[in-house]
Each structure stands twice: as C-alpha cells, then as structure tokens.
Image: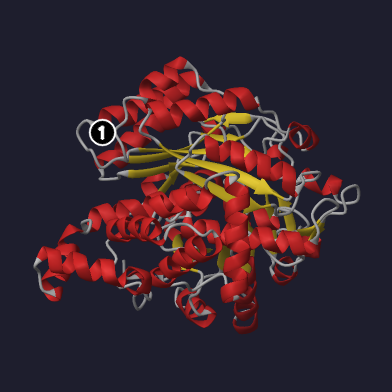
Amino acid sequence: MNRALHQPAAPAPGSGARIVLATLNAKYIHASLGLRCLLANMDRHGGAGLRAQTQLREFVIGQPATRMVEDLLALQPEVIGLGVYIWNVVETTQLVRLLKALRPDISIVLGGPEVSFEVEQQEICRLADHVVTGWGDVSFPKLCLALLDGPQPLMKVIAGEQPPLAELALPYNEYTAEDLAQRLLYVEASRGCPFKCEFCLSSLDKTAWAFELDGFMAEMDALYRRGARNFKFVDRTFNLKIANSVRILQFFLDRIAEAPDVFVHFEVVPDSLPDRLKELIAQFPAGALQFEVGIQSFNPEVQQRISRQQDNGKTADNLRWLVGQSRAHVHADLIFGLPGETLESFAQGFDRLHGLAPHEIQFGVLKRLRGTPITRHTAGFAMVYDPQTPYTILQNSTVDFAAMQRIKRFARYWEMVANSGRFSQGLSLLLSPGSAFGNFLAFSDWLWQTTGKTHEFALEKLVDLLFAHLTQVRALDSAQVAAALMADYQASGARGRPQCLATLLAGAQRASGLPEEKARTERQGRHLGQQQALREEMQKAAAAA
C-alpha cells in the first residue's frame, strides 16, 4: 500500500471545527478506537450539538510536525484533544510545542495512558492546558463544553469519570467507509482486567466490565453489513466470560459462511479454554482466526513475584491443542527482564514455548509503563530503565547491561528471521538440535559481530548471512542448507538473487525454459491479490499492536 496516498487530506477551504480530536498512530492501518469513543460521546456527555462541532484527525508517526500543525490550524479549532501513548509521546510533545508557540490561545487537552500517571514529571503535560487521566468518554466532552461556553475549569489535571458502560455511546458508527475498507478495526466487548500482572496497566483495573452484549453484537452486525471484514478485539481477557465468548465466536463463524475473508483477532487467557470454546474454534477455517496468547514467563517464582496467575500445565495443553487441533494462527508472547528472571531460566521457558510450536513467538523486553506496580521491585532487584520512551529495562540484579543488549538484538533478529515467515526450512536447521534459544542466541551474536547492525537487511543479504552461519559456523552440509534456503526463498516470491543460491536459481530458470522477463511475470502473477495482501498486513498489525 502506498502510504503517501493515505496521509490526512488538507482541510477544505472554509471547513472548520471548534474541537479537534487527534493522535499519531504508529501506522496508517491502525485506526484509533479511543478517539472514536470520545467522538461518539460528545453529544451524550457534553451537550447537544457538540459532536457536530468536533472533527477527527489521525496522523502517522514520521510525518513532519509542521505539516500536522498546518492541518490542525487550518480547521481553526478552539480546543485540540490529543491521544498520547508510549509510542507517540515524543512526537506529540513536539506537536504541542509548535501549537503553543503559534497559537497559545488554543486549549490543548491531553489524554491517554501515557499521561494518566506521573503527570507532574512530563514536559508534554507542563506544555498543555489540561490533562484528563484515565477514562475520557464522559470527562472530555464535559471539559470541552466548559472551555467553549464556560465557566472555565479551575483544575489543570482532571481525573476521568468512569461511568457504567451502559451510559456510554458505542463508537462504531464513527468508522468511515475508508476505515472499513483499508484499516484494522479495533473493537471492545469489555474493558478492564481482573488480573494483577504488575508489568501491565490493566492490573490497576481490579476487575473487568462487559458491554451489554445485545447492543454490542448489533454494532458488530452493522459494521459487517457496511463491509467490515477485519476486527481486532482489544479486550484484555476475551475468554474470561465463556458465555459471551461463545456468542461472539458463533457470530463470526456464521458470517464466515457467507464472507470467507472475515478475520478476527482475540487476546486470550492461556489456561482457560473449555470444551465449548474449543468446539467453536475448531470450526474456523485457516486465516480467519488469530489468538494472542500472553505467556510472558514459564518461571513459577517470577510469576508469583509479579502477581501473575497462570497454570503452566493447562497453558501448555491449550497451546498444544490450538496448534494441533485448530487452524487458528497462534501468536504467543514472552517478556525478558522480569525481576528475578535469569538468562538461564528464560532460556528454559523459551525452549518450552518453542516446543509447543506456536506460529509466532513475540519476544519482548520489559518496559516500565507509567503507573504500573512493577516499580515496587526497582530497589530489590536493581531494576534500571531507560528514562526515554519506551522505558525499556537496561539491566537488573540478574541480567547485566551487556547481556540485556544481547537479548535486545536477539529480539530484533528473531522478528526478522523467525516471525517473518520467510525461513521455515532454514529456521528448522538453525534451531536444532538442542536448545532453540541457545542456537538462535549464537546466531544473533554472530550476526551482530559480522554486520554490526540490527536493521536494514535486504532479504537476499539475510539469506546469504544465514547460509554463511549454517555452513561456516555450524558446519552443516552446504547442499542441504542451500536446498532449504532455496525452498524458503522461492516460497517467499522474492525476485532477487542471493549469492549462495545463484547456481540453484539459474538452474531452476533454465529448467523452466522461460526467459527472465516471462519468469518474472509469472512470479508476479502468483502473488497475492490486493485484498489478500491487505489482509496479511492487517494480521501482522493485529499481532504487533
């Protein structure tokens, strides 16, 4: 997709809005659910007519700040509300600086998880006029009404009001036709989480609240009838209330019968998969269902230390069932750097998870999210975090800085090689025999020493590097390695020529009897169509978000 074609359009001459809701998304394909929740509730909780005076603007990280400011000021707003997250706070701070320098009369209101805690420590909060912490569905419209019509609010920091969910207008009508056709749609059947995992902001919720199911399902049906086919559920615990989960799964299973391109993503509690859910999950076709399974750690001591409740035996059984008995795509998460986790204990957990064969292992490094209880371990485990976003752990009492850097490189290379899906056979050679973690760490160390970089690897160069490591360092048979990488490379649909495969690729071309240009045309013809390519991008975005 050409992102340049999908930048926010310049406002039409004469168009304006007294209130503008804006944020910087990581990618164009992401559509902000939070802003749409605010937009949908402007009339209900601010006053009749307030929605008509409000416009939504979404930008993408990487756009010039001056261009974003130009677009915002062209709307002639009196209030600008900005959604602030860990991934956009640096860029949003610069946006606020420019807005305040050019138009100090505009009221800047911040909201979002990044500014809901430690407000007094953040430059962006000092620059802004008001900060709404926590839920903004009710408090932001009320604040806007006061800013526009008075009386002027006395407090800069406003604790967000949390109403019963039945009092909130659902946001799904705010998705445009373009959103439905080209973007990943975020939906929520519930808010909150009953679990207390200390690295997660949801641990502060104490419980989970479900939206009224009939109304929610009616909204999902309306989205579907408008053409929506990609749904990412942001519920932290989708399978917490099984009766609701069953009804939601059945809804999408029924729709797939008439629209095979439906794709749904859920985050699930890993040790709770009763037979009622399994019976439905098993009926979904390949490519329709994706589960994000948060493992984080298989170390019982670490789990207890961070207040994570998880039955490791049931978790392993459920993962084994999902991979072996369903056609769902399984994306499993691990976190490195938790207090008390050693390199050795993490390696054991990684190998255990790898042995269960999820389709992807998302290997993350601990971040100190503002407000999370993980900070209570800072002194006891000498936890040192990067003071700059995303506040990644630098070292602790069991993993020094040098080892932490090795693991961060491991995570980056794992994403490129393992999670890319381009090295199925080559990865099998790389990770066996013995410890998958140990084998990949050795490759990661060698790749860093050989190249000195973690980004900007062309696929052809990566193939050559993997070949060199497997044949020169691991001393595997070169013909076996070349055959495996050749199969992977051809399956990827790539059209370059890695040096290690030059002879095999030339032989394959001669055997086909096709000139290079015709061969290239046929390869292009085998590529996925535009809609399938978009669907795959949405699946990746859903897993990464």
Q: Is residue 215 visible?
A: no
Instruction: Out of 408 and 40, give the one closest to the viewer.
Output: 408
Determine which residue is flagged by label 1: 256
Rate crowding at label 1 as few (under 14), some (14 to 19) or many (20 or more) other CA atoms within 10 Å: some
Is residue 421 or residue 28 the one in the foreground? Answer: 421
- Which residue is rendered at x = 46% and y = 23% of the image? 244
Going by the image, does 514 lie left or right of 10? left
User: Is 434 on the left-hand or right-hand side of 513?
Assistant: right
Q: Quadrant of the N terminus?
A: bottom left
Q: How is the image coloured?
A: secondary structure
Query: Picture quarter containing residue 28?
Result: bottom left
Instruction: Give SS at disc 1.
Output: helix
Where residue 502 appears, as percent x and y from the top left, is: 30, 72
Closest to the observer: 219 or 502? Answer: 502
Q: Position of residue 60 (x, y in %)?
A: 47, 68
Q: Position of residue 264 (x, y in %)?
A: 38, 39
Q: Is residue 382 above or below residue 253?
A: below
Residue 481: tell me if it is visible. yes
**Residue extending furthest toward the top:** 275
- Position of 526 relative to 334 (above/below): below
**Residue found 50% across the figure and 77% down from its top:** 73
Residue under the point 9% across and 69% down:
514
230 displayed left or right of 165:
left
Seen as rendered, the residue at the extreme right is: 379
- Amino acid carrying mark 1 in the image: Ile
Query: Going by the picture, which residue comes out furthest to the left?
Result: 513
